[in-house]
Amino acid sequence: MKKLFILAFASLLLSGCVALVESRVNMHRFRDQLDSDYKGVIVEGVEYSDGLCYDLFIPQDLKSDRASKLILYVHGGSWTGGSRDEGERWCRHFADLGYTAATMDYSLQKGKATPSIDDMIADMHSCLASIIDTAAARDVVLEEMGLFGFSAGATLVMLYGFREAARSELPVRFLVQMAGPVTFEPDTWKSEVHRYVDRVLHLDGSPKGDAAFVARMSGKEVTASMIEDGSAKPIWEAISPVSQVRPGSVPVLMAYGETDGVVPRSHKRLLIAALEEAGVHYDYIGYPNSGHTPIYDPECHERFISMADDYCLRYFGQ
C-alpha cells in the first residue's frame, strides 16, 4: 500500500505540473481583460498558518457597502502546486469595483506532505478567520462573501460552499468557478480524457489504483476490497462537491473549456444535473475552442468576467 501511495503522489505531482504549466503559459493572453486602475491598499503576505499566506486587497472607499463584501480567490494546480499569485489580477479587478478581495495559499500535496482535501478546507476556515481580523484592523468589517476558484481551487470553493456554508466564518452568497473537478469517484476520471491523465492519476483500472487515488485525496485508509464492495463510496462522496449539492445551495457561475483534456468533461454534466435536480440556480459559459484554461475564446472570457461582476451585484446583500 505504501508503494501505491508513493506512485499516486508522483502521478498527482506530474498532473499538477501539466495543469500549472498550461495555466501559466496561456493565462497571460487575457491579462488585458482584467486590467484595472486599482489604487487601494494591498496587504501582502499575511501568514495565517505555518508558511501559508494570503494577500488582502482593500478598496479605496471604506464607507461603501461594497467594502464589507469579500471575494476570496483559491488557486489551481492539481492540489500539488500553484500559489496565491494566480488570483492577483482578479483581486485587483474586484477591489477596483469597490469590494474587498483576497487570494490565498493552502496546503499542497508535495514533498513529504500529504494533506487531504479536508485539510485544505480547514485551511480555508483558518484563512477566513485571519482575513476578518486583518480587515477589521483596517476599518473594514466584513459581512458576507463570494468564493472564486480555478481548477483544483474550484473544487475547494465548491466543496466549501456546498458543504461548509452552515459553519462558515462569513455567509457564502455565491460561487464562481472555472474548470473545477466535481467528484473523486475513480470511474469518472477514466473517461473522456487524454490517456496521460489516467497515467498521472495512476488510475490503471485496477481496484488498487482506485484505492490509492481515493486514499490520497481523502486522507482515509482505503483498500482494493473497499472499492470492489462499494464501501469506499461514502469516503469519496464526502469530499466530492457534486455529492454535497442540496436544495438551497448557493448559486454557481461556472465555466469549462469544451476541449478540456485535464478535467473530464463528464464532471461538468454531473454538476449541472445535480444543480438542476436540487433546483439551484447556475449559469454556464462554455469555451468552445479552449482546453483547461481559457486560451482561445476572448469573447467568452469577457462574458465570464461580466457575469462574475453581475453575481456580485445580484447576490450580495440578499
Image (cartoon, rainbow, N blue to C red):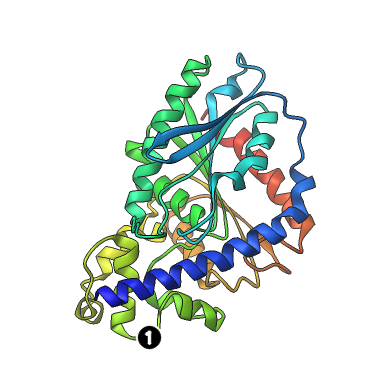
x, y percentage for residue 13?
Answer: 47, 66
1 displayed left or right of 148: left
Looking at the image, how many numbered discs can be counted on the residues? 1
Q: Quadrant of the N terminus?
A: bottom left
Residue 205, placed above or below residue 200: below
For mark 1, does the 10 Å Cα neighbourhood hold few (<14), some (14 to 19), or many (20 or more) residues? Answer: few
- Say what secondary structure mark 1 lies in: loop
Residue at image position (40%, 80%) is 203
Q: Amino acid at mark 1?
A: Gly
Residue 97, placed above or below residue 64: below
Residue 310, placed above or below residue 237: above
156 displayed left or right of 298: left
Q: Which residue is mark 1?
A: 205
Residue at image position (76%, 52%) is 30
x, y percentage for residue 89?
Answer: 67, 41
Q: Nearer the viewer, residue 84 or 318?
A: 84
Q: Is residue 316 visible?
A: no
x, y percentage for residue 26?
Answer: 71, 60
Residue at image position (47%, 80%) is 198
